Image (cartoon, helix red, strand yellow):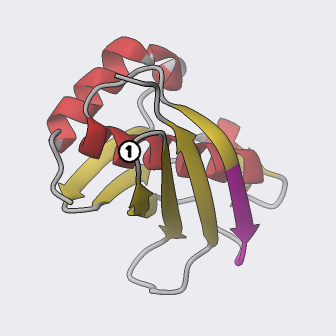
Amino acid sequence: MQPIMTAAEINAFLDTDFPQIHTDGRVFHVAEVTAGRVTMTFDPAERHLRPGGTVSGPAMFTLADVAAYAAVLAHIGPVALAFTTNLNINFLRLPKAQLIRCECRVLKLGKRLAVVDALLLQGDSDDPVAQATATYSIPPR
């Protein structure tokens, strides 16, 4: 499946249609869009950390959700009313207080539902800090 939106177009769409994700500063950025895939980066701020200096679960959940949404948009176009119907996340390792990249792969893109797998990674490691599966409802055209 070929994308119909670029990383720049998705970033611009998120800026205009979902500016609340940047309320306290820009921390989410779509870095790459390829066939069936999107990579988003998240640069956590102090507010995203939990005691002990690791990135909080809610911050990683948000990254997985926004990145999976971006992956769906990349392949269906700027449909603001697509929404999450389910997101399951597995926290696998303690994430350091540093950049996290979320690599999303569209597993299924139907007329009404899309399913996306998301791996959250740090540094050069191939060992994810979290893994999520998200399902999105796509409104009728």
Q: Residue 74, relative to residue 117: is it above or below?
A: above
Q: Secondary structure at mark 1?
A: helix
Left or right: where 130 falls relative to 16: right
The total number of labels drawn is 1
Can the viewer see residue 44?
Answer: yes
Can the viewer see residue 56?
Answer: no
Which residue ends up furthest to the bottom in the rendered image? 126
Q: Quadrant of the N terminus?
A: bottom left
Left or right: where 61 falls relative to 111: right
What is the magenta segment's predominant secondary structure? strand
**Magenta stretch encompasses residue 111:** no
Which residue ends up furthest to the right in the rendered image? 51
The amino acid marked with disc number 1 is Val
Residue drawn at x 81%, y 61% is 52
User: Measured from the top left, where is residue 40 in percent x and y?
Assistant: 37, 52
Which region is colored magenta? 87-93
Residue drawn at x 27%, y 32% is 11
Q: Quadrant of the C terminus?
A: top left
Q: In front: 116, or 19?
A: 116
Q: Which residue is mark 1?
A: 72
Q: Quadrant of residue 13?
A: top left
Q: Residue 86, relative to residue 126: is it above or below?
A: above
Left or right: where 124 falls relative to 46: left
Q: Quadrant of residue 111?
A: top left
User: Measured from the top left, where is residue 94 in percent x and y?
Assistant: 72, 72
Residue drawn at x 18%, y 31% is 9
User: Measured from the top left, where is residue 71 in percent x and y?
Assistant: 36, 49
* Circle 1 Cα neighbour tier, 10 Å, few/some/many (<14 / 14–19 / ≥20): many
Q: In front: 89, or 97?
A: 89
User: Measured from the top left, where is residue 84 in percent x and y?
Assistant: 61, 38
